[in-house]
Every structure is written in structure tokens, then in C-alpha cells.
Image: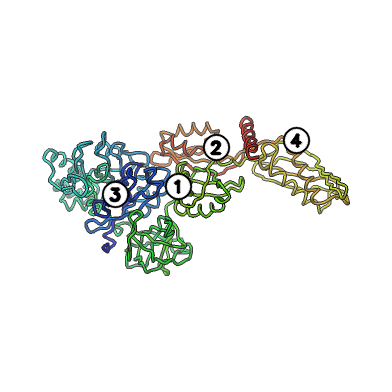
Amino acid sequence: MATFQSDQIRNIALVGHRSSGKTSLAEAMLFVTGAIGRLGSVDGGNATTDFIPEEIDRKLSISPALCHVEHSGTKINIIDTPGYAEFYSEVVPCLWVADTAVVVLDGVAGVEVHTRKVFAAAKTRGLPIIAVVSKLDKEHSSFEKVIESLGTLPGCKAVAVQMPIGSEGSFSGVVDLLSMKALFGAGKEAKVQDIPADIAEEAQAARDALVEEVAGSDEALMEKFFENDALTPEELLEGLKKAVRTGSVVPVLCSGAAGLTGAKFFLDFVADVLPSPVEMPAWMGHRVNETEETVVACDTAAPLAAVIWKTMRDPFIGRLSLVRVISGEMRRDGQGNNPRSGQRERLTGLTLVNGKETSDCDGLCAGDMGCIGKLENSITGDSLCDAKNQFVFSMPALPLGMHTAAMRAESRADEDKLSGALSQVGEEDIGFTYERMAETGELIARGMGPLHLQIIKEQLIRKFKVAVELGEPEIPYRETARKSVRVQGRHKKQTGGRGQFGDVWIRLEPLEPGSGYEFVNGVSGGSVPTNYIPAVEKGIVDAMGAGPLARYPIVDVRVTLDDGSSHPVDSSDLAFRLAGQIAMRKAMLEAGPVLLEPVVVAEITCPDEVMGDVMSDLSGRRGRVQGTEPAGGGMVTVKALVPLGEMTTYSSDLTSMSQGRASYTMEMAHYEEVPSHQQEAIIARRKVAEEETE
């Protein structure tokens, strides 16, 4: 491959709703430029950027993929991103390293739920945005209606820079409003011709509208436009480039279902209009052990600084790291220091990639992207730098995975391999996390939705031969006392030899919620020898592990040991420990035991129009709304206290309720008493579960 300089690089991320045509557009770019010899497809299971078995089986993108093409003296790095909401966490680092977001829209559906999400994310990042209307050869497609729907996105001034020739089944080509030429046909066979006479007037009107929008984005251009009632082709091109960089306009282009019709004009637009890394704002990073940010310019002559934005694993090579070079030059024979791990990495595995295919690469200039194999101590989000100039770059915050499932290995052999397998899966999928819950002992898997965790399960089986089951997590209920009681616990056993004797009196009192457990030594006169008091407390703590209602741990009580008796021969630590257990169990039975449930603070950010539905749904879950506040962009945040047991299906329910436009977070608040009718149902379920495991 030819050597490219920073100003010859274009980094684009294809984003949009699922099935909008992102992967097809990437495939068309690869085919038209000769990067691949055969056109693949999603339906055919042979698309270059959908190569994971789970992607091929489901015909959807799960993980971002990097590819590149050469066109008109530029190298275009293309990141094909997932469009399914459950894999949005994978889109975040793609927008971190891209220089332009290419929003792909279905010509029939227009702006969809995920379109709004990725558009807002690109705007927040300050990225230039262009739009491509795909599938214009499909029935009921409409270029004009899609542009209208783009106008509903906050901060989106959509303007056509191309127009389709024909519509639906008669869609046959594209008019480029910059060059005022027509492109007929698809793929490599497409021919540039003059605009047909029957649409020349329509094309001129569309160009005039484009000129007005571009002129209106810049005062100097506006003056020239008013003076001459027109802009020269050079002024229009330069004005459009500036308007795209500043986000003043969102140019809209055309494409057919397979991405081939209009592909050449799209490539021309990327090369001629979109910004290179040099034209983008410099990256900001902070040196190791410093908090103040420093400008890191896109300069190949500067010291090396690069970021890892995606980690993958190949069964033969091992860890593969997709990188973007921020400054300096990454050489195949070079090294890079990781400020996080403090380790030096060899860069001998430097390659270029097209999906899963790799090719040798001697080096990458500032602003370029590629892949490094076999890094030992570096993962997604890490930087690789010159030893004397080490920078850390902050990746944008990832959405929190709120969908949880209890993960259980199917066999002992699977259990032994599970921990290592999960560690590697977590490296690849930054939206997946897991933890062992101290309260229940369960392994809890967290993802963005049920499909996300189902795919994790399939990958564990396919890649690591680890079979697991997914189920609902156990809710960590607790038990406590309602009233104070004083009881005796007596353990006496005579077996013919030395006996066992321990006798204690304890007073059990309820404490304020959240107080935990308190033990008080109130013995006077030596009725319980001092050396046996720790054993009594151990027995009490033993009994607190399983309450009388449903064998959940006991909390928020004070236990006072105030009397007892001993035997000079038969008393022992074991006898007094058993006496403590007996006393505690007896006390809880008499103290009016109740069940406590965990309550979380949930914050739901949703569109204004579904706020009423969200609040009504929370009430149905026994939630108590604490307030609302505007979140910007037509969104509102609802804050509520909700029992954790009512949130087990909330992720999928909220997605359905809001059509995927809402998100939420939750964190533990406190424990509250379970209503009596709910308590009976929980106790019954617990007993059934225990009987099934016996």
C-alpha cells in the first residue's frame, strides 16, 4: 500500500439504526476501490466487516470493524459500527477516534430511534456529521421525506449535496450538486455523464438551495453571495468544507440498497470535503501523574502517542488491538510505553486490516489507524507513547450495563475455566462486566440487554468451550425484628463421659434501618465466664446468617448478653456457642420478624412525551417518584426510589416503552420492610427453591 501523510487521511465512522445500510455502504466502498474482489453482503453472510459467527448467524453487526480504501490520493479509514441499541457501548470509542460521523439512514424509515442517539453523541463529541440516505431503490423510499425527518434532530441543518435520479424501482443514479454531473449505474461500471435535461431544472434548484445554505454559514461568503448572487465552484467547495467542520450544516448524500449506486460520488465527497486529522482540533491529554491537560498535535515529527480503541482476540494470534495514532509515527520495529501498566510494548505485530483480513504495514503516520498484534499488557482505552512523553487520553464515558443475569457454570470443569474466559470476553466487549456478589454468592453478568448477554453466553461456548446458564439474579433480602424480647438459650447434653453445658440470657432489640448489628456484653457477677463470651457472640452471629422467615441474613439488631450460668466441668466454647445460636433463633421467632428488601435510587432519562408512561410504570413497580428535571434536547430525568426486586426486567421493559430512546442508572439506597402480601409470596418462592435444591 502507498505511504500516506496525515493530510491525506480520512477517518469516518458509519453510524445509524440497525439495518440502515452501514455495512452495505462499507462493502460497496471496498468493492468499488478494488480493496476486495467480490462484493459481499449481510444476508449472504460474507460481508467484510461482519465476520464474527454470531454476526453472520443473526445478520447484524455486534462489534465495530475497521477497514480502509484508497481513493483520489487519500486513505479512507472506515469504522463500521453496530446499529443495535444493545451494542451502543461499542459505538462510543468509535466516535472517540473518528474525525467524521457518517449517519446512514434507511430511505423508507428515515430517522429512527438509534439515529437520534448516535447523532446526539456525535454532536456532543463536536464531530462533523454527514448523512447518507440508503435503500432509495426500495418501495416507499423518499429522499425528501428523510431530509425532512433529519430536520427534527436537534442542531441538524440538513442540506442535500446530491439528489437521486428516479425513485423506488426507477432509481438509477445520482446527481452531484457540487460538480453538477450525473452518475449512472452501480459500482465499478458507473459512468459520469451530463445531467439529463428532464431533471436539469430540479437539479439547479437544489444546487441553489445548497449555495444559499453554505453562504449563510459564513459571513464572508454571505457578502460574496449578495454581491454576485452566486458562488464560484471553488468558493462553494471551500465554504462547504468549513461548514461541515464547524457543524453548521449536515450534507445529505444518496445511495441504493447495496450501496453501489452513488458509491463513487460518495468516495469523492469523503476525499474532497471531509476533514483530515490535521484539520481537526488537536487532541487533549495529560501527562502521567499530572491532571492539567496538554495539547497533543497531529504531527508525525512529534513523539509517538496513540490510543487503543478496540481489543479483539484471534484464536491463533491472540490479542489484537485496533489503534489510532494521535501524534508521531508508529513503526513496525518500534516500541510504545503504556502509562497505565507502566510496561513497554513491542510493536512488531503492526498491520493494516480489512475486517478480519490483515496486511503488513511498516508504519502509521499521525492520524492514521491500524492494528497491533500480541500486545501483552494493553487494553481498550490505553495509550502507547514515547518513553519520555507519556500521555493519557480520556475515553468518553461508557453507558452502564443495567441488564443483569445470574451466570452459572454447567459443570465443575466449566467452573474451573469460567474466570479466565470471562476476563478475555470483558477485554473484547467493553459493555460487558461481571462480579461475584458477596450477599448471595452469585456471579452476576451485566450487559446492555438480554440479547447482549445471550451473545456473551454463545461466545463462551464457541471460543472457550465453557457452558453456562443465565437466570434471574437472587434478590438479597434481609430479615429483622420488630420488637424487643428477652430469652434464654440453654444447651445441655450428657453422653456418659464429659457433658456439654452452656446457658445464656440475651435481650434482642431492633435498631434503626442501616445500623447493622451490635453485640453488648452486659454480664455482671461472672454468671458467664469472660472466656466464654466470645463463643456466645460467635453463636449469635452464626444464627444471624439465616433468619426464621426465609433464611435470609438478619440485620439491624442489638443483642445484649446479660445473664447465664456455667458448669465447672461440662462448659466449653462449643457449648456456649451452641447456646448463643439457640438463644438467637428463639429471640427472632418471638420478636415479630419481618422481611426487608433492597431499594434502589433509579434515574431514568427519557423523552418528554413518554415521561408520563415512565412514571406510571414506576408506580406499578411500587416506586416512589422523587422528582424530575430537564435533561436537554427534549429529554427529562425522572428520579425514583424503587424496590430492586421490581427492576429485574426493567431494561427490556423500558426499551419497549420508549422505543429504545430512554436509558437509566440505579444504585443501592437502603432496605425497607416488605409489604405483608409481598412478603408471603417471597417466603413461598424461597421455600420452593430450597425444596428443589434438596
**Mark 4 residue element:** helix
Quarter-of-image position of residue 406: top right
Q: Are marks 4 and 1 in contact (CB under 8 Å)?
A: no
Label 4 sits on residue: 590
Residue 45 to residue 681: above or below? below
Q: Earlier in the sequence, mark 4 or mark 2?
A: 4
Q: Nearer the viewer, residue 427 or 418?
A: 418
Q: Are marks 2 and 1 in contact (CB under 8 Å)?
A: no
State which quarter of the image contains the C terminus: top right
> Mark 4 to mark 2: distance in Å?
30 Å
| Earlier residue among tags 1 and 3 | 3
Q: Residues within 10 Å of mark 1 (few under 14, many from 20)?
A: some
Amino acid type assigned to the residue bearing label 3 in the image: Glu
Q: Marks 4 and 2: CB-CB under 8 Å? A: no
Sequence-first disc among 2 and 1? 1
The amino acid sitting under disc 2 is: Val
User: Do callouts 2 and 3 mark residues in contact (Cβ within 8 Å)?
Assistant: no
Dot 2: element: strand
Pointer 1 residue: 399
Residue 145 drawn above or below residue 237: above
Q: Nearer the viewer, residue 309 or 320?
A: 320
Please name whichever residue, 483 or 569, is drawn nearer the observer in this view of the structure: 569
